[in-house]
């Protein structure tokens, strides 16, 4: 009798992974390990966990531009479609200069209110990204002030089921307070500016059908280091959501000039698996 | 009398013109009835939501939802059932269950090879009921 009740308790437990959200509404995983586009965190939470459910997403990103290669691996937990915890490791290969830059990013995101799909209010989330640079010698040499830093951001995202051309559209705006130079790979703060900057980041996408999303992103950057100007980033992307387990993104990224090396354009690929 | 007759002719002329593009894209009354039949079959095969339909008269459910959709998309139908809040009160429909129903509708629309634009228009209309259906 006891065994039976324990069994039924387990059976009805709220702690089960499930796929309660609609396809693609967990978005993809950014280069900083959180749910979003490629370079912009969104108000979405990763995986397909809805209320009372949990989900895990693992992700790998790779960008190959003229003089640099960025590799990212991350893991991301979502409970209740309310709280998202993420850990990401970034490694930037310096092809022409030699060596690499590395950092770890610990992310927390809370959905505050609203819903991506239903109702008129946008889904709004607040997030923190705590970043720890593991290769601080070079950042310090070029004028960075700290080997760790914390970004704070607020994001608002909305999907329109039947937007222009009767296609489903999604848009996101993120306002971030940051001291990070080139995401933090070149440390935090600098000789020119050591205060927090407020930067805007935005994405817009259109679903051609249920599985294919095309879109563009823009990300403002601070400019704290005197040795080289830091530029805003942008990309155009194609996302593929064949099912609720896998998502793949291909993008063309334009990172302008990084560390004084111009014309950093190239390809970006991202693969994520959700459980 | 003359005016009554004119009004009747006018309203008869007006009826087909009022029927929306979406109503036509869905195959009018017959198309909506068929689509809703597939939708109901999808729901009946879905373990995530079937518990809510255990004591439901499926034929009546099909008739009412077809009538409701026909009216909502601008067809010449009048929905005679109760409003969505009344219908769903006490059911405790979760957000996941609502999404499961949406997925069943998408599967049915795919079976009927409806264009993505037609699917999106219908989904957008029905998604408006989320607040009246979930958590009641």
Image (cartoon, coloured by chain):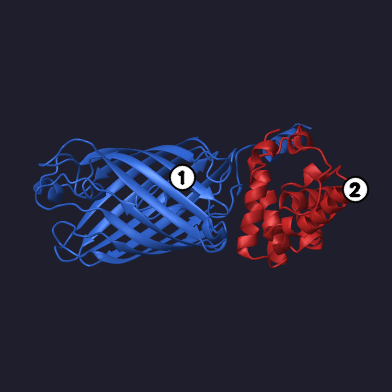
Chain colours: A blue, B red
| Residue B23 appears left or right of A202 | right
What x and y, as percent, mark residue A15?
60, 39
> For the residue labelled by badge 1, is the local secondary structure a helix, a strand or a loop?
strand
Crowd around label 1: few <14 · some 14–19 · many ≥20 (10 Å): many
> For the residue labelled by badge 2, is the local secondary structure a helix, a strand or a loop?
loop
* Closer to the camera in the image, B97 or A162: A162
What x and y, as percent, mark residue A269?
38, 64
Q: Which residue is pictured at 88% across the width and 46% down the height?
A: B57
* Closer to the camera in the image, A18 or A1: A18
What x and y, as percent, mark residue B113?
69, 68
Q: CA distance from mark 1 to mark 2?
A: 58 Å
Q: How many dots with numbers? A: 2
**For the residues carrying marks 1 and 2, which lies nearer the camera in this image?**
2
- Residue on which the image places disc 2: B1
What x and y, as percent, mark residue B112?
72, 66
Point out which mark residue A157 bears: 1
Crowd around label 2: few <14 · some 14–19 · many ≥20 (10 Å): few
Would you identify the image quadrant in which residue A188 lies? Answer: top left
Above-or-below relation of A152 to A272: above
Q: Which residue is pictured at 55% across the width and 49% down the height?
A: A48
Subunit that carries the residue with mark 2: B
Q: Quadrant of the C terminus of chain B?
A: top right
């Amino acid at each position: 009798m006891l065994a039976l009740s324990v069994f039924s308790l387990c059976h009805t437990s709220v702690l089960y992974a499930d796929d309660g959200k609609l396809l693609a509404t967990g978005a993809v995983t950014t280069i900083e390990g959180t749910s979003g586009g490629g370079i912009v965190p969104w108000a979405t939470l990763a995986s397909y966990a809805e209320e009372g459910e949990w989900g895990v997403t693992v992700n790998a990103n790779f960008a190959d531009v003229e003089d640099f290669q960025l590799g990212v691996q991350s893991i991301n937990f979502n409970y209740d479609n309310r709280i998202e915890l993420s850990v990401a490791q970034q490694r930037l290969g310096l092809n022409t200069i030699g060596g690499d830059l590395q950092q770890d990013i610990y992310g927390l995101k809370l959905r505050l209110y609203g819903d991506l799909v239903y109702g008129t209010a946008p889904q709004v989330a607040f997030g923190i990204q705590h970043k720890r640079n593991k290769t601080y010698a070079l950042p310090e040499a070029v004028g960075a002030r700290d080997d760790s830093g914390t970004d704070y951001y607020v994001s608002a995202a909305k999907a329109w089921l039947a937007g222009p051309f009767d296609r489903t559209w999604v848009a996101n705006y993120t306002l971030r307070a940051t001291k990070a130079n080139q995401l933090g790979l070149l440390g935090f703060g600098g000789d020119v500016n050591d205060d927090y900057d407020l930067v805007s980041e935005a994405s817009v996408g259109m679903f051609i059908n249920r599985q294919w999303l095309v879109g563009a992103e823009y990300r403002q950057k601070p400019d704290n280091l005197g040795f080289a100007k830091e530029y805003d980033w942008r990309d155009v992307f194609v996302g593929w959501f064949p099912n609720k387990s896998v998502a793949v993104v291909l993008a063309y990224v334009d990172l302008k000039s990084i560390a004084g090396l111009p014309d950093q354009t190239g390809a970006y690929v991202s693969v994520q698996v959700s459980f | 009398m003359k005016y009554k007759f004119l009004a009747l002719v006018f309203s008869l002329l007006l009826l087909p013109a009022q029927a929306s593009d979406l109503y036509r894209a869905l195959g009018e009354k017959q198309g909506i009835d068929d689509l809703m039949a597939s939708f109901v079959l999808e729901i009946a095969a879905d373990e995530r939501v079937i518990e809510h339909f255990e004591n439901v008269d499926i034929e009546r459910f099909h008739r009412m939802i077809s009538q409701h959709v026909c009216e909502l998309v601008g067809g010449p139908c009048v929905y005679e059932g109760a409003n969505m809040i009344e219908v769903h009160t006490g059911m405790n429909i979760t957000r996941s269950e609502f999404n499961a129903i949406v997925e069943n509708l998408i599967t049915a629309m795919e079976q009927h090879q409806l264009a993505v634009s037609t699917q999106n228009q219908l989904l957008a209309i029905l998604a408006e009921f989320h607040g009246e259906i979930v958590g009641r």
